[in-house]
Image (spheres, rainbow, N blue to C red):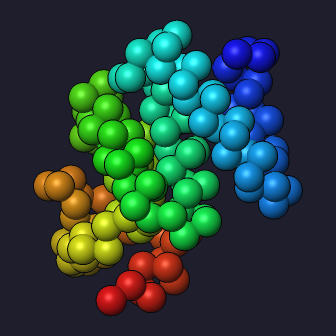
Amino acid sequence: MRGCVCQINDLGLLLKTTGKLPQAEQLYTEGLAGRRERFGNVHPKTLTSMNNLGALYYAQGRLEEARPLAEEALSGRRELLGDKHPETLQTVRSTCSTCFPSYVRAEREGHDVMIFLGIEIRCPLFSPCEEEFKSKP
């Protein structure tokens, strides 16, 4: 493996941001493998790499490849950090919006909430993606 796995992931992010998705995928894949080997499957850095690669697959329309990574990252964050940790809630938001359009939206105490796997997220945590949520069937 070439370079530090952290640098590989950062370079992958740069390539994705500049639209070089095939090159970003190669680095994200390499970075995830390195982080799994070095840190294990349930480590914050490994889970971040899973999210990054899953988001890249989603951006390419490869939902069947994105879904297992999103599920694994969410499961790991729940195990490691608990359901109410901000990183878990962020993972729930991104997992729901990218891979599981069957989440439930409801209103609680005058706030719009999203419910997925028994976890409630109030609107302020996912409002930047509000238009994306509205477009889901």
The image position of residue 86, as x and y in percent, is: 41, 42
Q: Based on the displayed image, in which of its 4 quarters is residue 30 positioned?
A: top right
Q: Is residue 46 above or below residue 51?
A: above
Q: Would residue 124 be seen by someone viewing this image from the given angle?
A: no
Q: Would residue 40 be seen by someone viewing this image from the given angle?
A: yes
Q: Based on the displayed image, in which of its 4 quarters is residue 135 positioned?
A: bottom left
Q: Nearer the viewer, residue 1 or 15?
A: 1
Q: Nearer the viewer, residue 54 or 118?
A: 54
Q: Based on the displayed image, in which of its 4 quarters is residue 66 positioned?
A: bottom left
The image position of residue 82, as x and y in percent, is: 25, 33
Q: Nearer the viewer, residue 98 or 107?
A: 98
Say whether residue 85 is left or right of residue 106.
right
> What residue appears at the point 24 percent right and 29 percent down from the top-left corner?
79
Say whether residue 62 is left or right of residue 26.
left
**Quadrant location of the C terminus?**
bottom left
> What residue appears at the point 47 percent right and 20 percent down from the top-left corner?
36
Say whether residue 100 is left or right of residue 32.
left
Q: Nearer the viewer, residue 64 or 16?
A: 64
Q: Is residue 44 above or below residue 96?
A: above
The image position of residue 44, as x and y in percent, is: 47, 25
> What residue appears at the point 67 percent right and 20 percent down from the top-left corner?
5
> What residue appears at the point 81 percent right and 55 percent down from the top-left corner?
20
